[in-house]
Amino acid sequence: MNKTITLRDIAKALGLSVSTVSRALTDSYQIGDETKQKVLAYANEHHYLPNRIARSLKEGKSRSIGVVVCSIDNNFVAQMLDGIDHYCTEHNYQLIIMQSKESFEQEKACVNLLYSGGVDGLLISPTYQTTDFEYLIKLQKAGLPIVLFDRLSSQIDTHKVAADNFKGAYDATMHLINNGHRAIAHINSHTQLSMATERFEGYQTALKDAGLEYREELVKFCDTTTVSALNENLGKALGQLMGSKDRPTAIFTATDQLSTKCLALLNKTGYQIPNDVALIGFSNTDLADALNPSLSTVHQPAFEIGSLATAQLLSLIKNSSESFETVLLPVQIEVRASSAQIK
């Protein structure tokens, strides 16, 4: 059986002190290049792996961060996690990912488990159910650096990173207006998080700027916390919208799941898109071009959101007294067949 070598083994083999080997492996300026190369070559040849626990005890840091997201099977979330992982890897940090499954109680359990496990900081995209951030504020006061990403709230003061939801919603609605639509429905998630409220406000502002009346009956807020809730509530919302006498000629959806599911349900019930009703929505699906018809989307810089949020967290870990900032990254309207202008 192969034995894992230690710093002491390398030091003995090369006739060096343990402290010299340790400094060489961490690229210390105190060690010459020739000694560094000799130590690194021996360490690589004998498959040396640093003891993370021992290092964390010495440095007072675990070099790990916790991440809490709604679900990793969401394409947009997966892209953000890719950005987080990429930045962590570049900066020698370990990543621990947990899923809240849109449950506030599970979110709290995930955060408490990560905190008790000794993570250096926390990245969190809160659940749709989350309205009370007091438990996070308490952990923050206890010394845990926390950064919100994607789903933001004004209830906690910290670094925050998300897409420019208002501008994305405004541009998507204005795209439909410019294509001649006047009765535009909006379907959103039922949550108090800024992601939903800003997209709703962007929709309202576009209507106002175009001189169009806001019609409350054309706006539906759906419970999307579970797949069954999403299917039931979205189906009901579409039935009410499309079954009305003055039904909408276009729909703007506010989330990835709502957008793709709305397209599927409209197809299933026999509506021709965009002839019967046009559709555009927030979505980062890689299959937008392959859907029938291809789906017009508001595309968010998911990788960049994850990467920047991680950069802010690592900066906060190093300097807990730095001032906080909220960064909203630009989105991109990608026009496809589902919202094409009808001639």
Image: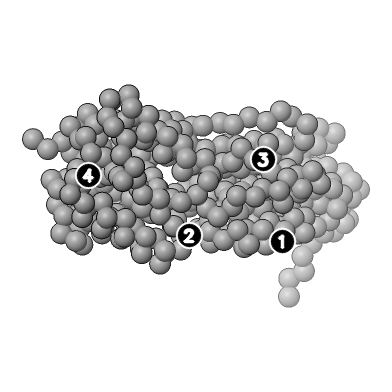
In the rendered structure, which amino acid carries the disc numbered 2? Thr
Report whether residue 276 is seen. yes
Q: What element carries label 3?
A: loop
Q: What element carries label 4?
A: loop
Residue 134 as seen in the image, left or right of residue 162: right
Residue 181 as seen in the image, left or right of residue 53: left
For the residue carrying disc 1, how many other residues have a C-alpha within 10 Å: few (<14), some (14-19), or many (20+)?
some
Q: Do the residues labelled 2 and 1 touch (CB within 8 Å)?
A: no
Figure quadrant of residue 51:
bottom right
Residue behind mark 3: 156
Figure quadrant of residue 299:
top left
Q: What's the CA distance linking mark 3 and mark 1? A: 20 Å
Q: Tell me where residue 17 appears, x and y as whole percent.
A: 91, 48
Q: What's the CA distance linking mark 2 and mark 1? A: 22 Å
In the rendered structure, which amino acid carries the disc numbered 1? Leu
Residue behind mark 1: 113
Residue at image position (21%, 62%) is 268
Q: What's the CA distance linking mark 4 and mark 2? A: 26 Å
In the rendered structure, which amino acid carries the disc numbered 3? Ile
